[in-house]
Structure formats: structure tokens, C-alpha cells
Image (cartoon, rainbow, N blue to C red):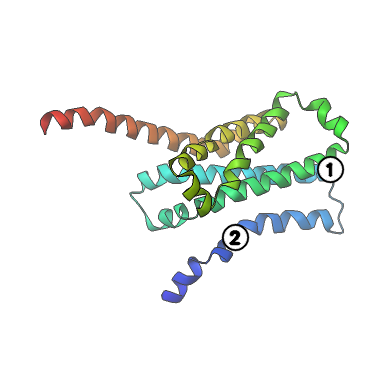
Amino acid sequence: MDGMRRILDSKPLFWALLAIPALVILPRWFGEDVYLPDDLIAPTGVWAARFIILALMLTPLSMLSRGASWIRWLVQRRRALGVAAFAYSVLHLFFYLLDMETLENVLAEIGAFGIWTGWAAILLMLPLALTSNDAAMRALRTGWKRLQRLAYPAALLTLIHWMFIHDSLAEALIHFAPLAALQLYRLLRRFEFRSQAPHQEETA
């Protein structure tokens, strides 16, 4: 049992699990079959979205599941999920830039709604990734949590980017609907708690 627990608590193992999609995607670029950068933009972007969705789902999931052990296990690794989301976003950007070929081509379409929202999402995720470590938490103190809330507008921008650039509303909503439902549940719980607090004070 202790051996299994050590394996499950292994950070290298968890990072290896997060790297599996990249290990599936990247060989396509180097393999014998011809995969152009354009073919790899979508899958890297999808995995970036999936990891940020999962990271943001954990708090309401822990409320809903009343602290289930597997949720607690994931919550302890939430920072790694956020860093993975950023890493796949960088891969997504890398293949996009390769596909665009020149800076002139990049600048020509940067004002498009579906494009600048993607850039904005990555820029918001950058400080989150840079501060996802114990040293940053100690240095920023209470400001660290406020900074990490940038993940929510980053996720929203990711959704908008996905809907407009790939013209795939249904696929984007399928991915983001569980997050939206859980965040709504979280807000309702918070509202319920605040509405009950004055009543509890009166009866105390």
C-alpha cells in the first residue's frame, strides 16, 4: 500500500501523464507521414483547453463530492495542470507561427476576433505559469490567489478563440459546458451560504 501511495504521489509520474498527449502529437511532425504545422495546431490547442478546464473544475468538484480522495489528489496537483495548459498553448502557438511562416502574415490577421483572443489567453496564462511555484506563493502571499484568478478570463478567451477560429461552436461548448455548470453550482452555493449567514447570526 505504501509503495502504491509513493507511486501515486510521484511528481515525475504525474508530469509524464501530462506529457502523453504531446508524445502522441509531436511524432506526427517528425514521422514518415507528412503532417504540416497546420495539422498540429488544433490538437495542441484542444489539449491546452482541456487542461485549463480540468484545473478550474477542481474547486467546485471538491465541493460537490465533499472532499473525495481522488479530487483531493488532483487539487494537490492543480498547479501542474495549469502549467501543462500553458505548455500546450505554447505548442499551439509554435505550430501556428510555423504555419504562418512570416511575421507579416502574423500581423496581417492579428486584429481578427478569433486570433487576438487566442493571443490574449496566452498572455494571461504566462504570469500564471511563471508563478506556479512555492517561491512565488511565498513572495506574493495573498496576492498570489488574486493573480491566479486570471485563469478564468483566460479560459473564457480560450472558449471564444476556439469558437471563432475553428468555427466549431458545438465542440467548444461540449468541452466547456461541464466547467460552466460546475462554476454555476459554485456561485449558487456561495450565494446560499451568504444568504444563510445573517439568519444564523440572528438566531445565535
Instruction: Give the total of numbered labels.
Output: 2
Residue 35 relative to residue 81: left or right: right
Q: Quadrant of the N terminus?
A: bottom left
Identify the residue position indicated by label 2 in the image.
Answer: 15
Position of 194 with respect to 10 (left or right) is: left
What percent of the width, then of the height, locates residue 29?
82, 53
The residue at the point 57 percent across, 31 percent down is: 156
Disc 1 residue type (three-letter): Leu
> In the rendered view, would you say 198 is above or below 43?
above
Q: Is residue 149 left or right of residue 63?
A: right
Residue 202 picture quarter? top left
Residue 164 placement: quadrant:
top right
Identify residue type, mark 2: Trp
Image coordinates for residue 70, horizontal then vertical, percent: 42, 57
- 80 shown above or below 192: below
What quarter of the picture does the C terminus occupy? top left
Instruction: Please name the residue shown 70% across and 55% down the image.
Output: 22
Q: Nearer the viewer, residue 1 or 174?
A: 1
Label 1: state its secondary structure. helix
Residue 127 place in picture, x, y as percent: 60, 41
x, y percent for residue 39: 79, 44
Q: Earlier in the sequence, mark 1 or mark 2?
A: 2
User: Crowdedness of circle 1 by 10 Å Cα count: few (<14), some, many (20+)?
Assistant: few
* Residue occupied by mark 1: 98
Mark pair 1, 2: CA separation? 26 Å
Classify mark 2: helix, strand or loop: helix
- Residue 74 higher or lower than 201, as above or below: below
